[in-house]
Amino acid sequence: WSLYESLLCQNSAFFRKELQGSFKEGKEKKLTLPDDEPEVFELFVQWLLTGGYLRDNEIRTRESLERYLTSDNGNGTEGPTELMVQKSSKAWILGDKLQCEVGFKNYAMNHIY
């Protein structure tokens, strides 16, 4: 990803330390997170850019679309899907690791319950 440094630093103490400090990453303006799943980081990026992410981030098939439409976000009666609970749980953990402001972690938590 190529993201605005100011946006990352505004929402994460981890990125502030890494990118604005005297670390190699700050000088090169390049940072890798090899231990984190790209699809979970994608949820963070979506939240940074839009203020949210889809309840089911993979609405690509008819089945996943039907799951989305029966979830709360799709105005259905069922709660969050198991897939979304797993992804949002991982998103909350990532937010904690990145020392995010409470907004992202609260958003992820709201998608778990």
Image (tube, rainbow, N blue to C red):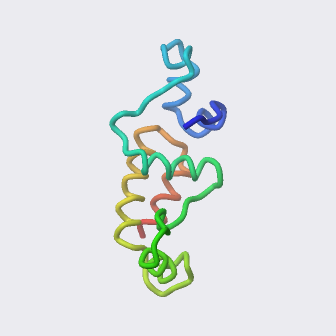
Residue 9 vertical placement versus 26 (above, below): below
In percent of width and height, residue 2 lies at: 59, 35
Residue placed furthest toward the front: 61
Residue 113 vertical placement versus 46 (above, below): below
In percent of width and height, residue 79 lies at: 43, 79
Q: How many marks?
A: 0
Residue 88 figure quarter: bottom left
Residue 52 figure quarter: bottom right
Looking at the picture, tell me which residue is in the foreground, 68 or 10.
Answer: 68
Quadrant in which the N terminus appears: top right
- Please give the name of the residue rendered at 55% of the width and 18% of the height, measured from the top-left corner: 26
- Please give the name of the residue rendered at 51% of the width and 85% of the height, measured from the top-left corner: 76
In percent of width and height, residue 66 lies at: 47, 81
Residue 65 vertical placement versus 35 (above, below): below
Residue 28 left/right relative to 94:
right
- Please give the name of the residue rendered at 50% of the width and 52% of the height, measured from the top-left corner: 43
Residue 54 figure quarter: bottom right
Quadrant in which the C terminus appears: bottom left
Looking at the picture, tell me which residue is in the foreground, 98 or 48.
Answer: 48
- Please give the name of the residue rendered at 48% of the width and 52% of the height, measured from the top-left corner: 105
Residue 64 vertical placement versus 7 (above, below): below
